[in-house]
Amino acid sequence: MDSGAVVRAFFERMEARDWDGAAALVAPDVVVDYTHTGERFVGDAVVEMNRAYPEGWTITVVDVVTRGDRAAAQVRVDHGDDVFWCAGFYTVADGRIASGTEHWVTAGSSQPPGWRAPFSRGPVA
């Protein structure tokens, strides 16, 4: 699999709750950083943290862009009334995610500044 297919399969396996399958797609010494909270997850913690997330969520891979051993993914997570978006950037080596940086936001959690109002075409669907 190319780097984009690995990243897509990782999220799809998490959506399927295929934890062993997801774990098979990350390197044993993988490092994933969350910029919004300053957290770093290493090794097994990457999958185990996701497994521990309170149930009731769905993951939709919106887009994956690939360039060599790098992949960028846009992912939507619905959990009850909440919608979360992830922009993730990953390096893949030997068919496994070796590192990643994820930027998470909660839809609707920030109000746009007033100065942008003349340029905005309304809310995103």
Image (spheres, rainbow, N blue to C red):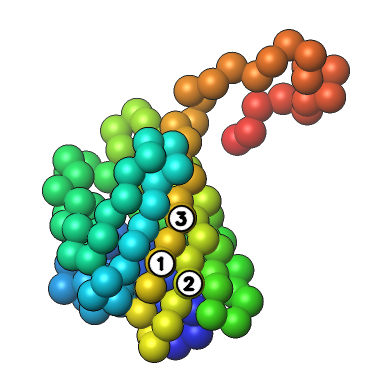
Res. 84 visible in picture: no
Q: From the image, tell me which residue sits under label 2.
A: 91
Classify mark 1: residues with Cα within 10 Å, few (<14), some (14-19) or many (20+): many
Where is residue 22, by image quadrant? Answer: bottom left
Q: From the image, tell me which residue sits under label 3.
A: 101
In this rendered view, identify the residue nearer to me: 12 or 44.
44
- Which tag, 2 or 3, sits closer to the chain's start? 2
SS at mark 3 in the image: strand
Depicted 75 relative to depicted 93: above or below: above
Depicted 104 relative to depicted 99: above or below: above
Q: Left of 11 or right of it: where is 112?
A: right
Residue at the (31%, 68%) spot, across then down: 30
Q: From the image, tell me which residue sits under label 1.
A: 99
Residue 81: % across, % down: 34, 29
Residue 73: % across, % down: 52, 60
In this rendered view, identify the residue nearer to me: 23 or 55.
23
Mark 3 vs 1: CB contact within 8 A: yes
**Disc 2 residue type?**
Thr
Depicted 59 relative to depicted 97: above or below: above
Residue at the (79%, 14%) spot, across then down: 115
Where is residue 80, by image quadrant? Answer: top left
Residue at the (27%, 71%) spot, across then down: 29
Depicted 52 relative to depicted 47: above or below: above
SS at mark 2 in the image: strand
Mark 2 vs 3: CB contact within 8 A: no
**Disc 3 residue type?**
Thr
Where is residue 84, by image quadrant? Answer: top left
